[in-house]
Amino acid sequence: MGLVVQKYGGSSVADAEGIKRVAKRVVDAKRNGNQVVVVVSAMGDTTDELIDLAEQVSPIPAGREFDMLLTAGERISMALLAMAIKNLGHEAQSFTGSQAGVITDSVHNKARIIDVTPGRIRTSIDEGNIAIVAGFQGVSQEGKNITTLGRGGSDTTAVALAAALDAEVCEIYTDVDGVFTADPRVVKKAKKIDWISFEDMLELAASGSKVLLHRCVEYARRYNIPIHVRSSFSGLRGTWVSNEPQGDQKVEHAIISGVAHDVSEAKVTVVGVPDKPGEAAAIFRAIANAEVNIDMVVQNVSAASTGLTDISFTLPKAEGRKAIDALERAKGSIGFESLRYDDQIAKISLVGAGMKTNPGVTADFFEALSDAGVNIELISTSEIRISVVTRADDVNEAVRAVHTAFGLDSDSDEAVVYGGTGR
Ligand code: ASP
Ligand code: MG
């Protein structure tokens, strides 16, 4: 008998009908002879609504209480799903993250899982139950406080439980049929990927692809847990993410896996920086001390006449204020002229391990953008990725142009988005 961990996202359990539909799927997996552990997200946009509510009572909701509030969303889904399963004549028990043994560090709102002790889950499934676990939450090892894992964290809960229970597979059910060669909300001709490596999936996730969270893929790779991303709305086979393709899993696009885009970043330009050793260090130390994570960095050649240069970097929009404040405070000691902040940018990335050994990928990428009339503002690369920053207004057109140029378009409009408000 195999052990399967299934995770259902918020759009799959958005209402009572959704919960009943998911209950049927879960029961099917159990009937097929598996032990089944299910991880659920909060119903629909519940998490966002709880955040709105918190902000109405306090401008800066406190970490501990904020986490306590947000975990309520997943508790609602887990209890309702257990009831729906019982109604179908099967035994189910629901567990909070803490009861399921998800132990985290103490960083409220973005805690990391440091251990999973799923004793109660093991007992429950060995007794013949279907175990339902609230995603996105745990309990801190030090203070025994309730924590949350950061937005979208239920995927990580699922993979962590799959690893701790030595599951055969972690199935992630979402509102699209799998991982696509581009966001199907933007590219109608995006193709479903049959199999993708952890390596490429990690780069796609880091580049803004939202179908799987970076942390979840990282976890799956570390413990070598194959992930099957699929839709809870269709019966279709989805995308397998693993080290190596197994059985009939097809590797379709040898060179490029896909195009990702990200509109959540902003660009900061530090203007008039003296071109001498220690300046970049001072700038990025100030940013680091403010606990801001940066992404791309570009320094211009300095003008010989002035000996001054500009340094640009990108960062999450949400951290923009913190970074600007930190730099303003350090302006005197660093000695630059001014700061520019631009949040009307987008990042477009092309990902694929095949580009390591294929010349011309960069040239083709830039040509596709230029043919589409898209101006490039920043460039960064890794061994298996090329990213550019463009104007936010150009993003959809740029993604489609690159997708077509690399032959990724499918012959049919197979990319279906079944649910979710995209919030
Ligand atoms: N409910 C949480 C969120 O919306 C966690 C999750 O969906 O994975 O971020
Ligand atoms: Mg959600």
Image (cartoon, grey):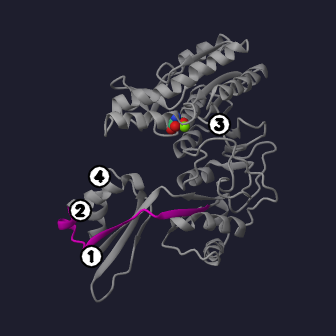
Q: Which residue is mark 3?
A: 172
Q: Distance from label 2 to label 3 (Cα)?
A: 44 Å
Contact between labelled residues 1 and 3, with CB atoms less than 8 Å apart: no
Image coordinates of residue 21 in percent, x first then y, are 71, 27
Between circles 1 and 2, the one closer to the viewer is 2
The circle drawn on residue 328 is 2
* 3D distance between C-alphas at marks 4 and 3: 35 Å
Which stretch did the figure color magenta? 330-350
What's the mark number on residue 276?
Answer: 1
Quarter where residue 370 is shown: bottom right
In this figure, which residue is indicated by the disc labeled 4? 290
Q: Nearer the viewer, mark 4 or mark 2?
A: 2
On the image, the x and y values in percent for residue 81 come to 63, 21
For label 3, the crowd category at 10 Å Cα-Cα, with few meaning under 14, some 14 to 19 and many 20 or more, is many
Side of 162 relative to 244 (left or right): left
In front of the other: label 1 or label 4? 4
SS for callout 3: strand
Residue 64 seen in render: yes
Q: Would you say the residues marked 4 and 3 are in contact, meaning their CB atoms lie under 8 Å apart?
A: no
Mark before the other along the chain sequence, 4 or 2: 4
